[in-house]
Image (cartoon, rainbow, N blue to C red):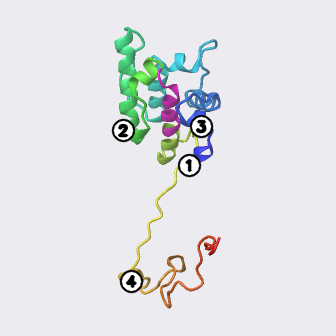
Amino acid sequence: MPGGRPLWQVAGKRDPEQEREAQEWIEAVLGERFPPGYSFDDVLRDGIILCRLMNKLSPGIIPKINYSGGDYKFMDNINMFQKACTQYGVPDVDLFQSVDLWDKKNIASVTMTIFALGRTAYKHPEWRGPFLGPRPSEENRRDFSEQQLRASEGIIGLQAGTNKGANQSGQSFGATRKILLGK
């Protein structure tokens, strides 16, 4: 279990619990429920909900959302959402590829992007709404003087051991070999 998570989650498989958490967060931010009878990925597929989510987190970050117009317009929604995520502060490595959602190739990656967006919201003091996932750690920078940095140079750490009086006395590896003569 890498990182304490079952292998099926790490390998890009969908996690219904995480999808439920992400959906509940989106619903709380938007103040409305997902349409009943539709799956998580079907509701997100046209990008409308994602664009509206971004505009709630950062008003006006997506100037025009396409509510109709076919596949190209909906793909444009997904691309605008990804661009807005980057502007909002979500790292590029946390963004899903458009085809992950549009072709439903990797919905787990879409869920991870939503979690990354929820974590990034912590960094925006103007956002007073709900958050998703744990608060990201903050830098705890410390400045040491040159004298403090040099103080450790003369110390040999116990983990490194010592070479004073080093020899091989007392060492034995494996069993000794018995040589029988006269047989």
**N-terminal-most mark, 4 or 3:** 3
Front label number (4 vs 3) = 3
Q: Quadrant of the C terminus?
A: bottom right
Q: Earlier in the sequence, mark 2 or mark 4?
A: 2
* Residue type, numbered disc 1: Arg
- Residue 37 is a magenta residue: no
Decide if residue 52 is on the left or right side of residue 69. Answer: right
Q: How far is disc 3 from disc 2 in space, using C-alphas?
A: 32 Å
The residue that label 3 is drawn on is: 7
- Against 92, residue 67 (above or below) is above
Mark sitting earlier along the chain (3/1)? 3
* Amino acid type at mark 4: Arg
Of the residues under marks 1 and 4, which one precedes in the sequence?
Answer: 1
Residue 96 percent location from the top left of the image: 43, 31
Magenta stretch bounds: 105-116
Q: What residue does disc 2 label?
A: 87
Q: Amino acid at mark 3?
A: Leu
- Of tags 3 and 1, the one toward the viewer is 3
For residue 135, the mark is 1
Q: Are marks 1 and 4 in contact (CB under 8 Å)?
A: no
Q: Nearer the viewer, mark 1 or mark 4?
A: 4
